[in-house]
Amino acid sequence: MKLLTAIIKPFKLEEVRSALTDIGLQGMTVTEVKGYGRQKGHTEIYRGAEYAVSFLPKIKIEIVIADDQVEKAIEAVQSVAKTGQIGDGKIFVSPIEHTIRVRTGETGDTAL
C-alpha cells in the first residue's frame, strides 16, 4: 500500500476527484493548506498599497491505494492538475506499513 499526497491548485480539486473516481479509487482526505515552492509567493495591490503574499492557498489530497494502482493514480492527478503554469503542485508517494478499518477491524488491502 502507498500513501499518495498531492498538493494542487484549489480550482483543480473537483477535476482531480473526478479523475480518481473514474479509475476506481474511493475515498480521500482533502485539506486546505497554504504554502509556496519555487514561485515564493507574489505581490498584490490592495487599496493602492502593494503587499507580498508569501503563502499561497493550495489543496492537499491524501489517498491510500494499493501498490498496483499507484501509477494510474499519479497519471490521473498529473493529467488534470497540470495547467502549465508555475505553482501547479507536487505529488508524493510514501509507503504505508499497516492499515486498519476501525469499524470492522479489517487490516491490509481489505481495509481500504
Image (cartoon, helix red, strand yellow):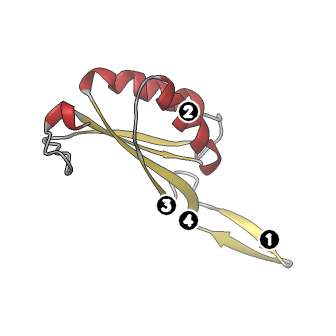
**Structural distance between the alpha carbons of marks 4 and 2:** 27 Å
Q: In the image, which is nearer the foreground, mark 1 or mark 3? A: 3
Q: Earlier in the sequence, mark 1 or mark 3?
A: 3
Q: Is residue 81 something one can see in this rendering? A: no
**Structural distance between the alpha carbons of marks 1 and 2:** 35 Å
Helix, strand, or loop for circle 3? strand
Residue, disc 2: 18
Quadrant, the C terminus: top left
Residue type for callout 4: Phe
Along the line of sight, the residue nearer the viewer: 21 or 35: 21
Q: Is residue 37 above or below residue 4?
A: below
Residue, disc 3: 33
Q: In the image, which is nearer the foreground, mark 4 or mark 2? A: 2
Residue, disc 4: 55
Residue, disc 1: 45
Helix, strand, or loop for circle 1? strand
Q: Earlier in the sequence, mark 4 or mark 2?
A: 2
Q: Earlier in the sequence, mark 1 or mark 4?
A: 1
**Structural distance between the alpha carbons of marks 4 and 3:** 9 Å
Quadrant, the N terminus: top left
Q: Is residue 86 left or right of residue 77?
A: right
Residue type for callout 1: Ile
Q: Which mark is residue 99?
A: none
Q: Does the residue at mark 1 contact the one at mark 4 (Cβ under 8 Å)?
A: no
Q: Residue at x 28, y 20 (%)?
A: 68
Task: Count how many numbered circles sit on residues in the image.
Answer: 4
Q: Does the residue at mark 4 contact the one at mark 3 (Cβ under 8 Å)?
A: no
Q: Is residue 73 left or right of residue 45?
A: left
Q: In the image, which is nearer the foreground, mark 2 or mark 3? A: 2
